[in-house]
Amino acid sequence: MIRSILYATDLGLYAPYVLQHALALARSFNARLYVVHAVEPMGLFAESVLQTYVDEARLKELRSTGLDTVMNSIELRVLEGFRDELGDNRQDLELINSVRVLQGDPPLAILEEAQKLGVDLLVVGSHSHGAALEVPLGRTAARLLQLSDVPVYLVPMLQHRARGE
């Protein structure tokens, strides 16, 4: 029985298409729908550039309050994007219980959130917006398929359908 679903989005070009699958599943199963977007942690290069231009006190402040502000603004942007995408369809918007933006390695952050929420199904796209067609499966999707304890509903990119693949 599917009572709750976690839709992991990369906010890419095909995110609205994958969202439609997640919403259809949530409607079909009368399930709660959660949305998560995982943001890669700042790399060493970016960190060293910041250290060059910002003093330690300001850097510490940016790490604590700045990161929270950025994450909250991304969450709001995602919700606004959903409102734009769904238009007058408030019933679909009401299916979405929460939107969370997490920092960390995307597959691991998504799986941690899935476990914390106790979801019964993960919904993901097969590729990120920048993946080449020759790559059969994106890194995050592949890792989720390998590591997930719950079923994964994988939505293929539209280009593969157009080419008959």
Image (cartoon, rainbow, N blue to C red):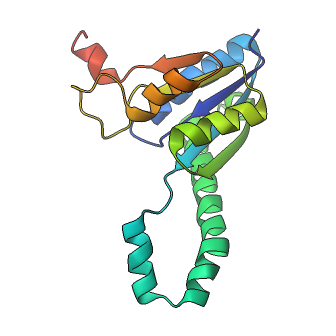
Relative to 125, 34 lies left or right: right
- Residue 78, image x, y percentages: 58, 48
Residue at figure coordinates x 77%, y 33% from the top left? 117
Relative to 127, 111 lies left or right: right
Residue at figure coordinates x 26%, y 27% from the top left? 135
Relative to 96, 74 lies left or right: left
Identify whether 5 is placed above or below 162: below
Residue at figure coordinates x 47%, y 41% from the top left? 10
Identify whether 52 is placed above or below 24: below
- Residue 75, image x, y percentages: 63, 53
Q: Nearer the viewer, residue 64 or 155?
A: 64
Relative to 149, 162 lies left or right: left
Q: Is residue 87 visible?
A: no
- Residue 156, image x, y percentages: 39, 20
Q: Is residue 36 visible?
A: yes
Residue at figure coordinates x 58%, y 34% from the top left? 86
Q: Nearer the viewer, residue 162 or 133?
A: 133
Q: Quadrant of residue 152?
A: top right
Q: Quadrant of residue 24?
A: top right
Quarter of the image where the N terminus is located: top right
Identify whether 48 is placed above or below 23: below
Q: How many marks?
A: 0
Q: Nearer the viewer, residue 131 or 84?
A: 131
Identify whether 156 is placed above or below 68: above
- Residue 19, image x, y percentages: 55, 29
Quarter of the image where the C terminus is located: top left
